[in-house]
Image (cartoon, rainbow, N blue to C red):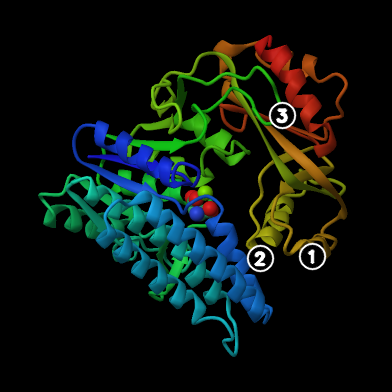
Amino acid sequence: MKVLKFGGTSVGSPSSIKEVANIVRNIEGKKTVVLSAMSGTTNALHEVADYIINYKEEEANQLIDDLIAKYVDVAHELLNEKENQEAAIALISDRFEYIREHVGIEIPSSQIEKNIVAQGEVLSTNLFIFHLKEEGAKATLVSAFDFMAIDEANEPVISKITEAYGEIVAANTNTEIFVTQGYICLSHRGKIDNLKRGGSDYSASLIGAAIKAEEIQIWTDIDGMHNNDPRFVENTFSLKELSFDEAAELAYFGAKILHPQSVIPARKANVPVMLKNTFEPNAAGTIIKNCDVPAGVRAIAAKDGITAIKIKSYRMLMAYGFLKGVFQVFENYKTSIDMITTSEVAVSLTIDDTTHLNEIVKELEEIGSVEVDTDLSIICLAGNFTEESKGASSPIFNSLTNIPIRMISYGGSNYNVSLVINTENKKEALVALNKGVFGR
Ligand code: ASP
Ligand code: MG
């Protein structure tokens, strides 16, 4: 079995949904197709939820009406037979009626938002199944709520996913194409939940790992992972191959093509992940697998919205327990640290979640003096920085002689060098690195 995931733009219009069906049909063997919501839908549903939470009922109803009209058009354009169109429209009405039940609710809660945004994937998968069936495919729709589960800590419950999805596959021997929703799941309380924005990749990786798939394919709107961020740099190129370690670093530190956590299950189960372009299905794409990593830098990504915190204390390293005290503060506020650098008198670290920044700073001030810098970006350079790559860092720093660097992290893993700079210098830094490191 192969697991094929198609993102929001891949299912963004009736014609692209048909294209997706063609791609799926041309891939041999059994497959599980994981779909995102049609592009724009998750954002729109978040907007509906926001209106409801802020008691803006008229706006909520208006947006729901607009979405219904849009989906009815999609059903007409996507499906040929009247009977199927009617069945699809009934499903659309039913899902939006469910959404509308939340409008005007007495005490809106965060559960409302989860219930509402989940409908995007329910709609896209149902429409896709209608189309596949009209084309005569042996396809089965599997509800993600029947197998995708997270625990109290929002971590996927691998045993449940493996067992439940395995049973579903075993019970449907005649099915060629299983179709399911990405992103959505049930919480430990059995309520509708999700794997966070962009989480459909993660769903695909979890399913692929659970069933030990031959391959996980992530179909999106770009021809694989590029050596640098194509939104800011010209002359980037798509990479043929990446190791799991490199891909994990790049996805975590800003490469938009992959959800940061999605490499983890695939790597654990050693299932290769192929990145492909729905709109250029014959382009090679990028394969992520266990492979040797050539010396030097292979790819660059950048992550914005970074805050750096410096804690200064005299005799920091000599005084044992200092770092423990610092880390404990972040643990108290469930705030994860991205990057760390230390000296004898100070430690600097970065976070991207500033929800509890004020409380964190207050507690840290009991340990030492604290400085906070905002509007920073992490530049992540992934590649091979082991001994055999000596000299690999000199083009990095030679490229950046005009750019102030706030932090440098080297040696945390063999596969990553990270720098922190001001976001206003990011584009210049990425362009300079493309020239200095890749000669482009
Ligand atoms: N539809 C969800 C989102 O837009 C999940 C996904 O596309 O992966 O975040
Ligand atoms: Mg999406």
Residue wearing tag 1 = 363
Q: Distance between the residues labelled 1 and 3?
A: 38 Å
Residue 288 percent coordinates (x, y): 42, 29
Res. 155 in view: no
Name the residue nearer the viewer: 336 or 259.
259
In terms of secondary structure, where does tag 3 sit? loop
- Kindly report the distance in space between the C-alpha atoms of the residues bearing marks 2 and 1: 10 Å
Question: Are the two marked residues, 2 and 1, in contact with CB atoms closer than 8 angstroms?
Answer: yes
The amino acid type found where label 3 is placed reads Phe
Q: Considering the numbered disc 1 on the image, is that residue within a helix, a strand or a loop? A: helix
What residue is shown with label 3? 232
Mark 3 residue crowding within 10 angstroms, few (<14) / some (14–19) / many (20+): few
Give the residue at x 78% y 25%: 429
Image disc number at residue 19 = none
Give coordinates of residue 3: x percent, y percent. 31, 41
| For marks 2 and 1 on the same chain, the one whose residue lies earlier in the sequence | 2
Residue occupied by mark 2: 332
